[in-house]
Image (cartoon, rainbow, N blue to C red):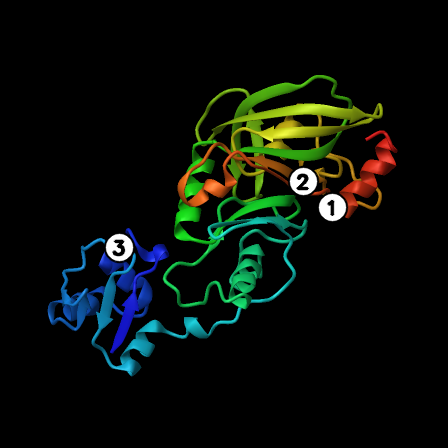
C-alpha cells in the first residue's frame, strides 16, 4: 500500500492524469481497472479518475510495493549532473539562470547535457526536487547555444505556468546586448516576416507575409560606435528562432562574427556576441508576486567584455 498526499505542484489536475505521471509505466486500462476495483481511492472513497485534485488530498494505492516499483520505473534512481550554475534570482517558484555561451538550453539529442539537466541536478542536490516527482521543473524560454544570458526556469507548476503565460502574452520585456557590423545612429523598431529552413537551421527575413512566414518585430538602440562597429541594446518584441541575428543581418548589420547571417570573422572570436542582459517583469500577484515589477540583469561575459573594450576602449 502507498499513501500519497497531494502537494501544490499536483493540485488542479485530474486524478487520472496524476496517476499516469506517478505510475508512468502502467497502461491507462490498468489504472482505470484499479479505480473500478477500488484498489486506488481518493480521500478514502471510490474515484472515477476525473476528479480534480486539491492540495492535501489523499491518494491511496492498494497495490503491492513490487507492483508500484515496477510501474514507477527506474526514473526515481536517476542522478542528474552537478555543476555550478549562475543564479541571478530565485524563489520558491522561479529561478533566473545566466546561461553561458556554448551550452544548450535544451538537449537536441538523447545523449546531450543541457541547461535543463544542470538545473535539475541543482535542485536534486538541494533536495528540492527528485526524479519520479510528478512535476518536473524546466525552462520557460530558450536561447541559442552560442547566445548567453538570462533564461527563466520554473521550479513549481504554478511558476512554470505563470512564466509561460507572461512570455506568450509578451508581458515580459527582454533586452539583449550585441555588437554589429557598420554604424547605426538612431533607435529603430524594424518589422518583417521570418521563415525558418529546418534542414539548414537558418532563417530568412522578408518584407511581405507569405506561406510559412511568421511576423517579427525587433527594436534596437545604438549605445556606441567606433566608425566600423556599433554596440546595440536590442529589445526582442516577438520571439522567433534566430530573430535578432536574421533580422539585423537582413538590414545589412550582421552580428560581429556571425558568418551564418553575413558577418565577417573577428580575431579571437568563435561564433558571435549576443547576450540576454535584462528582463523586466510586470506587476504580478500570487505565486510569482515576488517578481512583481522587478528588473533582473545578467553581467556581460568575459569574452564579450574583452572584445567590447578592444573595439570601444574605455568609453563605455
Residue linked to disc 1 = 301
Answer with mark 3 or mark 1, whichever residue precedes in sequence: 3
Q: Classify mark 2: helix, strand or loop.
A: strand
Q: Nearer the viewer, mark 3 or mark 1?
A: 3
Q: Is residue 82 above or below residue 163?
A: below
Residue 51 figure quarter: bottom left
Q: Is residue 141 left or right of residue 157?
A: right
The structure residue drawn at horizontal position 25% and vertical position 56%, both measured from the top left corner, is 53
Answer with mark 2 or mark 3, whichever residue precedes in sequence: 3
Q: Classify mark 3: helix, strand or loop.
A: loop
Instruction: Point out residue 230 in the picture as x, y percentages from the top left corner.
Output: 77, 27
CA separation, marks 3 and 1?
A: 44 Å
Q: Which mark is residue 54?
A: 3
Residue linked to disc 2 = 275
Instruction: Point out residue 92 in the picture as x, y percentages from the top left corner.
Output: 48, 53
CA separation, marks 1 and 2?
A: 8 Å
The structure residue drawn at horizontal position 83% and vertical position 46%, both measured from the top left corner, is 268
Q: Nearer the viewer, mark 2 or mark 3?
A: 3
Asked if labels 2 and 1 touch by Cβ distance under 8 angstroms, the answer is yes
The structure residue drawn at horizontal position 74% and vertical position 21%, both measured from the top left corner, is 184
| Mark 1 crowdedness (10 Å alpha carbons): few <14, some 14-19, many ≥20 | some
Answer with mark 1 or mark 2, whichever residue precedes in sequence: 2
| Mark 3 crowdedness (10 Å alpha carbons): few <14, some 14-19, many ≥20 | some
Q: Classify mark 1: helix, strand or loop.
A: loop
Instruction: Point out residue 131 in the picture as x, y percentages from the top left corner.
Output: 44, 67
Amino acid at each position: 500500500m502507498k499513501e500519497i498526499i497531494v502537494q501544490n505542484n499536483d493540485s488542479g489536475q485530474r486524478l487520472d492524469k496524476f496517476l499516469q505521471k506517478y505510475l508512468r509505466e502502467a497502461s491507462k486500462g490498468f489504472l482505470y481497472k484499479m479505480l473500478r476495483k477500488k484498489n486506488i481511492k481518493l480521500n478514502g472513497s471510490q474515484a472515477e479518475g476525473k476528479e480534480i485534485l486539491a492540495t492535501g488530498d489523499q491518494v491511496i494505492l492498494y497495490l503491492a510495493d513490487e507492483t508500484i516499483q515496477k510501474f514507477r520505473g527506474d526514473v526515481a534512481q536517476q542522478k542528474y549532473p552537478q555543476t555550478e550554475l549562475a543564479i541571478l534570482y530565485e524563489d520558491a517558484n522561479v529561478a533566473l539562470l545566466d546561461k553561458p555561451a556554448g551550452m544548450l538550453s535544451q538537449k537536441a539529442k538523447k545523449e546531450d547535457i543541457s541547461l535543463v539537466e544542470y538545473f535539475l541536478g541543482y535542485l536534486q542536490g538541494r533536495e528540492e526536487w527528485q526524479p519520479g516527482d510528478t512535476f518536473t521543473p524546466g525552462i520557460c524560454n530558450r536561447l541559442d547555444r552560442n547566445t548567453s544570458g538570462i533564461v527563466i526556469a520554473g521550479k513549481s507548476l504554478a511558476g512554470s505556468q505563470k512564466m509561460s503565460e507572461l512570455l506568450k502574452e509578451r508581458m515580459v520585456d527582454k533586452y539583449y546586448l550585441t555588437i554589429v557590423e557598420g554604424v547605426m545612429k538612431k533607435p529603430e523598431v524594424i518589422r518583417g516576416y521570418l521563415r525558418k529552413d529546418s534542414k539548414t537551421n537558418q532563417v530568412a527575413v522578408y518584407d511581405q507575409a507569405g506561406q510559412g512566414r511568421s511576423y517579427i518585430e525587433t527594436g534596437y538602440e545604438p549605445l556606441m560606435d567606433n566608425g566600423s562597429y556599433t554596440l546595440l541594446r536590442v529589445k526582442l518584441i516577438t520571439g522567433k528562432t534566430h530573430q535578432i541575428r536574421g533580422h539585423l543581418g537582413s538590414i545589412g548589420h550582421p552580428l560581429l562574427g556571425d558568418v551564418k547571417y553575413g558577418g565577417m570573422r573577428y580575431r579571437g572570436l568563435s561564433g558571435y556576441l549576443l547576450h540576454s542582459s535584462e528582463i523586466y517583469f510586470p506587476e504580478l500577484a500570487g505565486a510569482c508576486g515576488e517578481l512583481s515589477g522587478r528588473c533582473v540583469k545578467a553581467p556581460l561575459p568575459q569574452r564579450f567584455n574583452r572584445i567590447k573594450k578592444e573595439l570601444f576602449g574605455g568609453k563605455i
